[in-house]
Amino acid sequence: MPKVLDNFQISPLVWKMRVETPALVAKAKAGQFVILRVNEHGERVPMSIAGLDKKKGLLTIIYQVVGKTSALMTTVPGGGELSDCVGPLGVPSHVEKWGTACLVGGGIGIAPIYPIAQAYKEAGNKVITIIGARSKDLLFYEEEHRAVADELHVCTDDGSYGHHGFVSDVLKKLLDAGSKIGMIMAIGPVPMMKVVTNLTRSYQVPTWVSLNPLMIDGTGMCGGCRVSIGGETRFACVDGPDFDGHKVDFDLLSKRLGAYRDHERKAMKHFLAEPGCKLADAVRDFKYPDEK
Amino acid sequence: MVEKIPKKDRMKVPRQVMPEQKPEDRRKNFQEVPYGLTEEQALIEASRCLECKNIPCVAGCPVEVDIPGFIDLILHRDYAAAARKIKETNSLPAVCGRVCPQEEQCEVVCVLAKKHQPVAIGYLERFVADYEREHKLTRLPEIAPPTGRRVAVVGSGPAGLTVAGDLIKLGHEVTVFEALHKPGGVLVYGIPEFRLPKKIVQAECDFLAEMGVKFKNSTVIGKMDTVDELFEQGYDAIFIGTGAGLPNFMGIPGENLIGIYSANEYLTRSNLMRAFDPDDYDTPIIHGRNVAVLGGGNTAMDSVRTALRLGAENAYIVYRRSEKEMPARIEEIHHAQQEGVQFHMLTAPIKFNGDDQGRVVSMECIKMELGEPDASGRRRPVPIEGSNYTMVVDLVVVAIGNSSNPLVQKTTPGLETNRWGNIVADPETMQTSRKGVYAGGDIVTGGATVILAAGAGKKAARAMHKFLMEEVKK
Ligand SMILES: Cc1cc2nc3c(=O)[nH]c(=O)nc-3n(C[C@H](O)[C@H](O)[C@H](O)COP(=O)(O)OP(=O)(O)OC[C@H]3O[C@@H](n4cnc5c(N)ncnc54)[C@H](O)[C@@H]3O)c2cc1C
Ligand SMILES: Cc1cc2nc3c(=O)[nH]c(=O)nc-3n(C[C@H](O)[C@H](O)[C@H](O)COP(=O)(O)OP(=O)(O)OC[C@H]3O[C@@H](n4cnc5c(N)ncnc54)[C@H](O)[C@@H]3O)c2cc1C
Ligand code: SF4
Ligand code: FES
């Protein structure tokens, strides 16, 4: 069973976990993901690769508490174990030398764009990175990104830190200013990826996104992860997760992500009410966005 | 030994009826439907066998189990020996006794079938395998001294498990790589608990592990290591038994609405992830009230019966041909009918309609009639113009078959595949176009049966052993 080296909070609802999976790490590339289970009775949850330490065989996952399983993940102590962790899954992000490449990370998407930025940089690109969150306390990985990017832009929706506004506002300014961006990769919540791709379509800059539909096996066996790309059905776990953002049907993706909303909320309420379960205050006080 | 009755009297003994849960009870639970024969029944059933000289039943069995031989051992009340007799050619009797289509294989050709009813070979097979397991009479077979040869088995369905069992006995070192977190293939993720309890599959895998087979679960070959990398790591021969795991969809409008599952997804959620037991397991599943399952095979029957057990008020089979053409086992069709499944034959869906949340609410269908026979020899269904009608549904399960999963083929240069993407293998040795690489089961044949997969595993193991001993120098 894969051993967890450490697992700690990096913003109110975001945790960073490092897992010892040397064989997996040896094969993994930026843009791929893993599927893990916390215990025998748990769900299989997909998580992007947010960092690879090839020497030590360490996989970094950065996850946001959005429901029961992600909340349960916060309870695994350093030195503890996961039930299983399969990967690397999906196709690695396409990397070539475009000249200047721009990475856009919104919310939890700040994590997976980090290894991709490293890969773009290694391929000899000038890397412009834009990261954004709702407010200052929800930002993370700024230092890591600063160390890789040639140019880093940080923004918050409420203006509590960096530029006041959305990542797409910053991107628009760059494009308007005539930045010669050959390639954009945007990862974040579905509405954010939708806005970014709508924007870049008119500038005709190729824009890739990483899609996060519900998944089970991650090997192409169930078809639960199907997405619509240019009108054709694709299985995100084996054909993606990266797709040409200008062809993605984001509305379909949004809807499909809501398939189990009632079930998930019940499970989370139940979990939070369980006595004796040690949770960080932020998790204990967890509220869905529409409950606040 | 039970006194044998004269042959002419044996025909007068009626075939024993399998005791099973009542339809009205079982449609609400996931416990196994048939209870299995009692010892008394098994002895009566065994006494019916005519011990034919030309053994048509053995010829009808894809792996040629010595049927009269094991039946005779039942009459000697040596049930464990009977189970071992079966295991000489079929390593999974507890599974096959439950899921094999005996009515098309050994029982259909049984001499008694002509004028009377065939010997219940499947029931007896199940009886002895269960007896052996439940009475803890399973004994580790003799393992040959280590040969120093290493074998990798990719995929842990019936094909892979059979290869692993046969080669470990011959003294080779065997590692099974499985993509999912549990071994068993379709036996764990596809076939439901009420037809094949998962503890039986687990017992088979535990037994292999006890013999020394190493299981590496959660390891996707082609993503983690490729076939060539396995060779580099020192494996001397590789068996590919990755199954037919890529679900087909209809390709009609609205198919990506919420509430439309592939059978693989529906069954995996329920079986592997145990969504039928929400108190203990986290994976969600949609509980439909009006459920349509598209297709007529075993997978469709398993899906529709699962839907009933998850609380469907109406569970429909929607199939574009007639009942006669349904590929599912007759027993399963009967079980489904008894449980209250409604059959809409000669009907094909043409479109799904959703609500504003993207959930399926209805399905437009068209009636079909049977025309000229097609390439498969079955009469081709032709739509009847103007016969469209709408069915109210909140869950649809698409069970129209699987294609092969391309992960291994795509990452193995020089591995020959046919136009459907199945791996090409020699029918006798199961050797592929790559030296030292063997393949069998659904990945070679397309979706078939447990026993054909296990049989292919047997053949492959035989050829692999020869290859390992003669061509791999140590
Ligand atoms: C390829 C991929 C990479 C991902 N990478 C990350 C990551 O790096 N960090 C991170 O925090 N999250 C990531 N996710 C999303 C993560 O898997 C879900 O947040 C997680 O499964 C939620 O489980 P839960 O029980 O905590 O929440 P639930 O209460 O089950 O669900 C809350 C919401 O999370 C989403 N979700 C639920 N189950 C899944 C699932 N199996 N797959 C995808 N989304 C789901 C749904 O929108 C749901 O409404 C990724 C998803 C995919 C498909
Ligand atoms: C719902 C359902 C009901 C059925 N009912 C019956 C029945 O009643 N009677 C009958 O005889 N047959 C039945 N069948 C058919 C039967 O189950 C199959 O023919 C049989 O399981 C095929 O065995 P296999 O070993 O070839 O592959 P599978 O059982 O499909 O196993 C293949 C395994 O390989 C794994 N795998 C795939 N790719 C990789 C990879 N790259 N790396 C590692 N592992 C991998 C998969 O996860 C899987 O576990 C049914 C099938 C289904 C789906
Ligand atoms: S064909 Fe029937 S009666 Fe004859 S040996 Fe086989 S099982 Fe017995
Ligand atoms: S997650 Fe099952 S096919 Fe993609």
Image: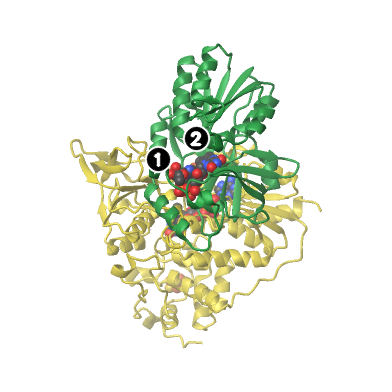
Chain colours: A green, B yellow
B12 lies left or right of A273: left
* Residue plotted at (49% across, 72% down): B53
Amino acid beneath label 1:
Arg
The front one of B374 and A72 is: A72
Q: Residue at x 49, y 15 (%)?
A: A203
Tag 2: residue type?
Leu
Give the farthest residue toward the left. Answer: B386
> What residue did someone put label 2 on?
A211
Disc on res. A70: none
Task: Please identify the quarter of the rendering in which residue B223 is found.
Answer: top right
Name the spot of residue B385 as percent of width and height, x first. Answer: 20, 35
Q: Is residue A97 left or right of residue A135?
A: right
Relative to A128, say whether B217 is above or below: below
Which residue is at 42% across, 83% downward? Answer: B40
Secondary structure beneath dot 2 equals loop
Question: How far from the left and from the top, in percent, is residue B199?
Answer: 51, 67
Camera-side residue of A134 and B242: A134
B312 relative position to B414: left or right: left
The CB of the residue at mark 2 lies under 8 Å from ligand 1: yes
* Of B440 and B271, the residue lying toward us: B271
| B394 vs B74: above or below | above
Give the image location of residue A164, x and y in percent.
Answer: 51, 25
Q: Which residue is mark 1?
A: A256
Q: Are labels 1 and 2 assigned to the same chain?
A: yes
User: Around disc 1, counting alpha carbons within 10 Å, would you say few (fewer than 14), some (14 to 19), or many (20 or more)?
Assistant: many
Element class at badge 1: helix
Marks 1 and 2, how far apart at CA: 12 Å
Q: Quadrant of residue A105?
A: top right
Count neighbours of disc 2 (C-alpha within 10 A) and say few if under 14, some if 14 to 19, many if 20 or more.
Answer: many
Above-or-below relation of B88 to B460: below
